[in-house]
Image (cartoon, rainbow, N blue to C red):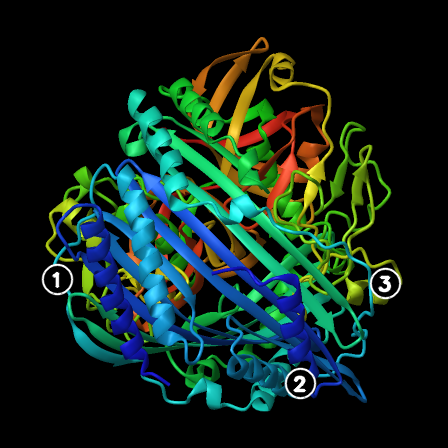
């Protein structure tokens, strides 16, 4: 499916807006296109060439007790479909309880248009098959089995509202990942991934080489006792920790409800001076960010941690009005049980290469990735998860061989407070749950592992 | 409007025709392979009242067509929304795109995809519903939730009160080149409430009847009414407050009695997922992981104690994955995954059943909707009831054991062996009864050892179905629903972890 262009997108959204009977209306219209292929030892296992629309109508009514609001969505742009969606939003909003704290919709803003990379949108299955063949060949040469994903996608989105706001953006994203392991994945395995805005910036051969290299280094992992270790976490491992601060940490709602680690700590130095974290959806290494949030508020870089000192929480229109602070542009689609979230965190790079980070460890572990990280306690962001796809023992500053996987149980707040080194190379990495973070490798002292595995 | 079954059939015919043309153009004989198509319409309404205001008020509708074709031993899939008057043109376009994808990707095929059996069924299925949930006026639903949420007012320590309900209706018309023509209407409802308190430096949440939105079933509004949310608000509120000053559950090894709303997660993560045959063969390694339950273990591996019987059943009344057919047109059924403690069966799809010598799929291939190709998903999977009453089980349990219930946190390794779960609430067992509250009981174990330690399961009077409405799998990730039946059960020598709380 072709993406809708700027003019088409805005015209259709304006048409929906004009038909609304609500006191205030916000219309978000997006078109998506996606091509992916998954592969394993048998070759391509699944693929899709698909497209869809996403139309969301947010209707608001003024009432003696405040504003009432609701949202309806659909995935078509047929007039009968969007009219039905508009009617559902309107009907639902009329029945919703009034909210005295709900502010009016925001007015006109200036947002720079962004456009997707045409080569990424045009990337074919034939070209993806070539990547798959290269991965299969490289794994076969090393007696390994592959599993991976090649994906290119694009989206175009606008938001218009009855207060005069009109913003538009379009984006593209290309990703290639490979997990390589011994047949049956019973022994050690290796993993690498790359995510870019432009398919031309992807290096599939580099991803394949890294994943295969990791798997070969990880062939016979040795038993290791749980306990406290100095760790060097590669970007993929860092991201799966950091994302929990996005889910439940940086937002004003969690702080106000006393469940965030930020609560009562804004302005405190919780971390070493070497740690800086911003939220920056428009960072050039982030693929696919729009220049506005789900209320159409322009996004700008926001400092979350500066030289180890934690800042103030991120907001949306509701929380900015409630707390009397600036709107930082971190709204989710409204109405929402969740408050604003910072989902584009960037850890400032340090000066050390990965080898230098490892060189500073007397005895510890290099961790490629964490699996199924989850949160035990929001107040200190106490997390647990497993190492995966390459855990290596470090002794006297050198890698000494593969180690079996371990489970960690550790507070993010505590662990980041013990950072002793920040890598210089940034990479975008995701995790099992939603989201991606842009981060370097980190060296952390006394990281707590609580149980072990037989693999 | 063109009948939707006609659209699905037209897509299948177009895919077969495109496959034959592509084959002929490549110099081969004109060979049609296999195709299926699903026209799928999903409606969902989410409503929640949070601290007296709207938390969520959202109505979603998804309507589109997904076409899957096997060409040259490789699957291609294409999907798009359906617009009035454009249905047949969309069907033809998607058929061509699916064949085009398969044609190019087939150049990288090592082992061709083979489908088990032939599933040319014609049939209808509809979830039995007493009260159509979408016919309940919005104002009535909002008032119902407001009343339930208000029962949690009255304690200054409470920082969040939330009551929510979710209604889902899925209608699907599916056809295949084997002659299948299936129409299904699935209705699911769920509701629940939760209260979060902040006091004594702690933040604790209690939920009813389960966390993450309550309990869901394939049923109508009668399921929501049956849960009596308002009748549990005060208890939930007070327990959340009391947990803030409760002792953390101490670390060490002791007996654990799991409540059913936690046991369902144990079933889901440590039995359901490792039992998916595509994981076993490494096809989900790139994100979700693989499985320790390898095919050499089938029929002989000791998965749990003799008491442990786990049955998969996509015909189970009320189950979130109860249906007539899966998304590969295979009829629903039931089978033992673990029988008397021994590993005895897998969840399979048509692509995978043959790999373990089975002639037919178990019928557990599902897609999130029209936008996604089907993959193997856990169906309703239940721990069968035992013979104990809950009171007798407590009376038979030593002092210092812990009763723990309601999912708070879960994590399990990529082979589904090492798990660590935290519950919302624990209670010390003392004098054969439930005693003081314990905060955040966190237990850790290894799947077969944990199930082997099960020495008592409560009877069917304590057994209920617990819905999982948001199970993620696949890459890109898809969400599916299923239920797990469970009654409280006892496990010996379980390791409780010091989570530093």
Among the 4 quarters of the image, the one containing residue B336: bottom left
Q: x, y (%) of residue B439?
A: 59, 53
> Sequence-wise, which precedes: disc 3 or disc 2?
2
Q: Chain of mark 2?
A: A
Do tags 3 and 1 sit on the same chain? no
Query: Element type at marker 1?
Result: loop
Label 3 to label 2: alpha-carbon separation: 34 Å
Q: x, y (%) of residue B225?
A: 47, 84
Label 3 to label 1: alpha-carbon separation: 63 Å
Q: Which residue is mark 1?
A: B118
- Residue under the point 72% across and 53% down: A291
For the N terminus of chain B, the quadrant is bottom left
- Residue under the point 52% across and 43% down: A174
Q: Nearer the viewer, residue A202 or B446?
A: A202
Neighbours of disc 1 within 10 Å: few (<14), some (14-19), many (20+): some
Among the 4 quarters of the image, the one containing residue A142: top left
Q: Nearer the viewer, residue B501 or B219?
A: B219
- Residue under the point 59% across and 75% down: B163
Q: Left of A64 or right of it: where is B465?
A: left
Extreme-right residue of the structure? A324
Q: Chain of mark 1?
A: B
Do tags 2 and 1 sit on the same chain? no
* Residue B422 sits above or below residue B3 on the image: above
Which mark's residue is nearer the viewer, 3 or 2? 2
Q: Left of A273 or right of it: where is B310?
A: left
Label 2 to label 1: alpha-carbon separation: 50 Å
Q: Which mark is residue A19?
A: 2
Q: Which residue is mark 3?
A: A323
Among the 4 quarters of the image, the one containing residue B309: bottom left
Q: Nearer the viewer, residue A188 or A445?
A: A188
């Amino acid at each position: 499916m072709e993406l809708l262009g700027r003019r088409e997108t805005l015209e259709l959204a304006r048409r929906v807006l004009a038909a609304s009977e609500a006191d205030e209306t916000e219309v978000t219209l997006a078109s998506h296109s996606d091509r992916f292929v998954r592969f394993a030892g048998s070759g391509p296992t699944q693929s899709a060439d698909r497209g869809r629309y996403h139309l969301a109508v947010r209707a608001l009514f003024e009432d003696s007790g405040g504003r009432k609001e609701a949202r309806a969505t659909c995935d078509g742009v047929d007039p009968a479909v969007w009219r039905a969606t508009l009617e559902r939003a309107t009907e639902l909003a009329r029945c919703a309880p009034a909210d005295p704290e709900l502010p009016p919709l925001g007015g006109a803003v200036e947002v720079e248009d962004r456009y997707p990379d045409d080569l990424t949108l045009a990337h074919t299955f034939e070209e993806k098959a070539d990547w798959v063949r290269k991965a299969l060949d490289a794994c076969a040469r090393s007696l390994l089995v592959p599993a991976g994903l090649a994906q290119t996608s694009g989206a175009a989105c606008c938001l218009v509202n009855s207060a005069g706001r009109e913003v538009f953006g379009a984006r593209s994203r290309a990703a290639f990942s490979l997990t390589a392991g011994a047949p049956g994945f019973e022994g050690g395995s290796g993993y690498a991934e790359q995510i870019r805005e432009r398919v031309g910036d992807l290096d599939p051969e580099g991803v394949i080489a890294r994943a295969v290299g990791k798997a070969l280094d990880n062939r016979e992992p040795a038993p290791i006792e749980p306990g406290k270790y100095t760790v060097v976490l590669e970007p993929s491992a860092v991201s799966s920790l950091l994302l929990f601060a996005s889910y439940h940490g940086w937002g004003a709602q969690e702080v106000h409800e006393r469940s965030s680690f930020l609560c009562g700590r804004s302005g405190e130095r919780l971390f070493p001076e070497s740690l800086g974290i911003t939220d920056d959806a428009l960072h050039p290494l982030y693929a696919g960010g729009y220049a506005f949030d789900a209320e159409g508020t322009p996004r700008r870089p926001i400092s979350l941690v500066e030289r180890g000192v934690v800042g103030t929480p991120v907001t949306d229109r509701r929380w900015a009005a409630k707390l009397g602070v600036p709107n930082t542009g971190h709204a989710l689609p409204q109405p929402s049980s969740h408050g604003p979230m910072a989902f584009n965190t960037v850890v400032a790079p340090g000066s050390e290469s990965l080898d230098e980070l490892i060189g500073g460890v007397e005895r510890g572990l290099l961790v490629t990735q964490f699996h199924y990280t989850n949160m035990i306690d929001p107040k200190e962001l106490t997390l647990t998860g497993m190492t995966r796809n390459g855990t290596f023992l470090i002794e006297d500053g050198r890698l000494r061989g593969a180690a079996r996987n371990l489970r960690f149980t550790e507070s993010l707040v505590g662990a980041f407070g013990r950072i002793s080194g920040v890598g210089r190379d940034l990479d975008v990495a995701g995790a099992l749950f939603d989201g991606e973070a842009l981060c370097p490798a980190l060296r952390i002292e006394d990281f707590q592992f609580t149980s072990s595995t037989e693999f | 409007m063109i009948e939707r079954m006609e659209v699905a059939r037209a897509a299948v015919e177009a895919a077969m025709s495109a496959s034959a043309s592509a084959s002929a153009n490549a110099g081969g004989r004109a060979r049609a392979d296999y195709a299926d198509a699903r026209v799928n319409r999903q409606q969902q309404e989410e409503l929640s009242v949070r601290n007296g205001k709207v938390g969520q008020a959202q109505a979603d509708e998804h309507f589109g067509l997904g076409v899957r074709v096997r060409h040259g031993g490789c699957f291609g899939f294409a999907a798009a929304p359906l617009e009035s008057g454009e249905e047949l043109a969309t069907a033809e376009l998607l058929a061509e795109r699916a064949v085009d994808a398969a044609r190019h990707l087939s150049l990288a095929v090592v082992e061709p995809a083979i489908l088990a059996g032939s599933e040319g069924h014609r049939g209808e299925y509809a979830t039995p519903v007493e009260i159509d949930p979408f016919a309940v006026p919005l104002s009535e639903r909002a008032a119902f939730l407001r009343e339930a949420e208000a029962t949690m007012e009255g304690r200054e320590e409470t920082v969040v009160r939330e009551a929510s309900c979710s209604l889902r209706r899925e209608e699907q018309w599916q056809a295949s080149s084997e002659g299948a023509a299936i129409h299904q209407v699935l209705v699911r409802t769920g509701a629940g409430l939760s209260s979060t308190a902040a006091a004594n430096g702690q933040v604790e949440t209690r939920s009813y009847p389960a966390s993450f939105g309550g309990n869901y079933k394939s049923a109508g509004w009668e399921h929501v009414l049956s849960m009596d949310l308002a009748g549990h608000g005060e208890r939930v509120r007070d327990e959340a407050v009391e947990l803030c000053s409760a002792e953390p559950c101490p670390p060490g090894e002791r007996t654990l009695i799991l409540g059913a709303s936690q046991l369902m997660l144990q079933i889901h993560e440590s039995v359901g997922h490792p039992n998916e045959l595509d994981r076993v063969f490494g096809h989900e390694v790139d994100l979700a992981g693989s499985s320790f339950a390898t095919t050499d273990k089938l029929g002989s591996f000791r998965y749990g104690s003799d008491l442990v019987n786990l049955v998969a059943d996509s015909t189970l009344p009320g189950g979130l994955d109860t249906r007539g057919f899966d998304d590969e047109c295979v009829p629903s059924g039931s089978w033992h995954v673990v029988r008397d403690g021994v590993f005895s069966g897998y969840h399979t799809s048509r692509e995978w059943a043959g790999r373990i010598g089975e002639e037919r799929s178990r019928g557990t291939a599902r897609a999130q909707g029209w936008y996604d190709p089907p993959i193997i998903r856990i169906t309703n999977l239940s721990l069968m009831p035992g013979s104990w009453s809950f009171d007798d089980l407590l009376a038979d349990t030593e002092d210092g054991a812990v009763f723990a219930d309601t999912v708070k946190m879960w994590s399990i390794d990529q082979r589904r062996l090492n798990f660590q779960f935290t519950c919302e609430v624990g209670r010390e067992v003392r004098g054969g009864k439930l005693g003081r509250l314990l905060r955040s009981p966190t237990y850790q174990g290894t799947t077969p050892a944990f199930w082997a330690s099960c020495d008592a399961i409560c009877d069917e009077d304590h057994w209920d179905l617990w819905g999982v409405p948001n199970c993620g799998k696949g890459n890109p990730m898809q969400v599916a629903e299923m239920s797990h039946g469970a009654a409280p059960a006892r496990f010996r020598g379980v390791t409780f972890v010091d989570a530093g709380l």
